[in-house]
């Protein structure tokens, strides 16, 4: 039977068996942003600074000489933005031999970019079969790992097909300098990924970046933010910030100047954007 029909039947069964819970879940999905914003406000009421979103660090405070090239980049949907990828590349280059872990690959734009400035890059992402079961469209599944397959050799990339919600992270048996969380964006899944990746940090300099902490550089994406806060060890929540001009949250132990900013922000910096397109060779 078609997977979508199976999921529909399962949902109907759940609605009949547990109507109150099911209706609550439907309400939560329908009004996710408001639901999770209220959740954060109530759960973190004792830390009013966190309840309104993360404090922001200016990307030019992090990298005063900020200049980066992002390639390959498809300029299509569902990837990190060029600024997000540039942030990751800049962070990776702070380490002499960066070991990079990424959750969520899709076309592998962030993966191939960061691998180009890292010693090693490990990708944890759903297998095509798991993507199918989760309800991803066939055309999307066909794009999985696109830039790994189409670029020059990327021998330092290791792809592990898995569902990170059930994956045994201890089996990786190694630590990482830079970790990028960009898999399942549901709050509970972000919480679980966050709990797991904190255990994989190599040392005091190691950092974590979460994609889609924000839905635009000016607005919080509340379900993801709730997952980050819930998954972050309590004593380290003060080390979280939003990197300006990106969709990313950052965990770092580096002392940073941060301030709360919200829509509509007055620009503090101006960036230069230079674009060049090249046709990809036909698939071999
Ligand atoms: C937004 S895309 C990643 C985009 C990529 N990081 C980039 O910027 O180029 C999300 C990816 O997460 C994967 N994913 C979703 N749920 C997952 C899970 N539970 N475990 C592992 N990967 C998951 C999807 O298969 C998809 O490849």
Image (spheres, rainbow, N blue to C red):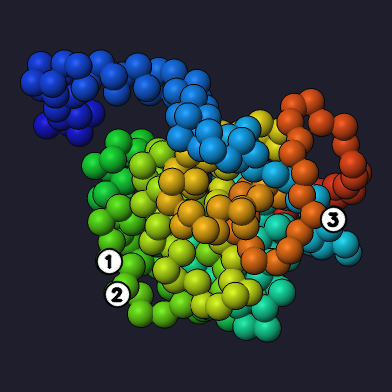
Asked if residue 175 can be seen in this view, the reply is: yes
**Disc 2 C-beta below 8 A from ligand 1:** no
**Depth check, front residue: 4 or 174:** 174
**Disc 3 C-beta below 8 A from ligand 1:** no
Residue 127 - label: none
Task: Identify the secondary structure beneath mark 2.
Answer: helix
Whole-percent x, y for residue 36 in the image: 47, 29
Q: Is residue 116 above or below residue 14?
A: below
Q: Earlier in the sequence, mark 2 or mark 3?
A: 3
Q: In the figure, residue 282 lies in which quadrant?
A: bottom right
What's the residue at 25%, 50% (across, down)? Answer: 129
Whole-percent x, y for residue 90 in the image: 73, 65
Residue 168 - label: 1
Q: Residues within 10 Å of mark 2 (few under 14, many from 20)?
A: few
Q: Earlier in the sequence, mark 3 or mark 1?
A: 3
Label 2: which residue? 171
Label 3: which residue? 60
Q: Residues within 10 Å of mark 3 (few under 14, many from 20)?
A: few
What's the residue at 16%, 16% (across, down)? Answer: 19
Task: Identify the secondary structure beneath mark 3.
Answer: helix
User: Cβ–Cβ below 8 Å for labels 1 and 2?
Assistant: yes
User: Cβ–Cβ below 8 Å for labels 2 and 3?
Assistant: no
How far apart in space, not on screen, are marks 2 and 3 (Cα)?
37 Å
How far apart in space, not on screen, are marks 3 and 1 (Cα)?
37 Å
């Amino acid at each position: 039977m078609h997977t979508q029909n199976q999921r529909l039947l399962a949902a109907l069964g759940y609605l009949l068996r547990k109507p109150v819970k099911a209706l609550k879940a439907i309400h939560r999905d329908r009004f996710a942003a408001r639901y999770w914003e209220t959740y954060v406000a109530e759960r973190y009421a004792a830390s009013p600074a966190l309840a309104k979103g993360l404090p922001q660090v200016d990307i030019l405070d992090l990298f005063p000489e900020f200049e980066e090239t992002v390639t390959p980049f498809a300029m299509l949907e569902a990837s990190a933005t060029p600024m997000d990828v540039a942030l990751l590349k800049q962070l990776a280059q702070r380490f002499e031999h960066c070991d990079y872990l990424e959750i969520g690959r899709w076309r592998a734009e962030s993966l191939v970019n960061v691998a180009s400035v890292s010693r090693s890059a490990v990708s944890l992402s759903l297998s095509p079969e798991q993507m199918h079961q989760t309800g991803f469209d066939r055309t999307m599944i066909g794009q999985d790992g696109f830039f790994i397959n189409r670029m020059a050799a990327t021998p330092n990339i290791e792809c592990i097909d898995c569902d990170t919600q059930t994956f045994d992270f201890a089996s990786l048996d190694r630590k990482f300098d830079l970790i990028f969380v960009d898999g399942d964006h549901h709050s509970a899944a972000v919480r679980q990924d966050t709990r797991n990746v904190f255990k994989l940090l190599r040392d005091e300099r190691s950092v974590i970046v979460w994609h889609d902490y924000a839905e635009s550089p000016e607005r919080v994406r509340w379900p993801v933010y709730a997952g980050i806060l819930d998954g972050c060890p309590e004593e380290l929540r003060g080390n979280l910030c939003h990197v300006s001009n990106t969709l990313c949250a950052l965990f770092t132990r580096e002392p940073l100047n941060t301030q709360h900013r919200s829509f509509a922000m007055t620009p503090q910096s101006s960036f230069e954007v230079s674009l060049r397109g090249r046709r990809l060779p036909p698939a071999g």
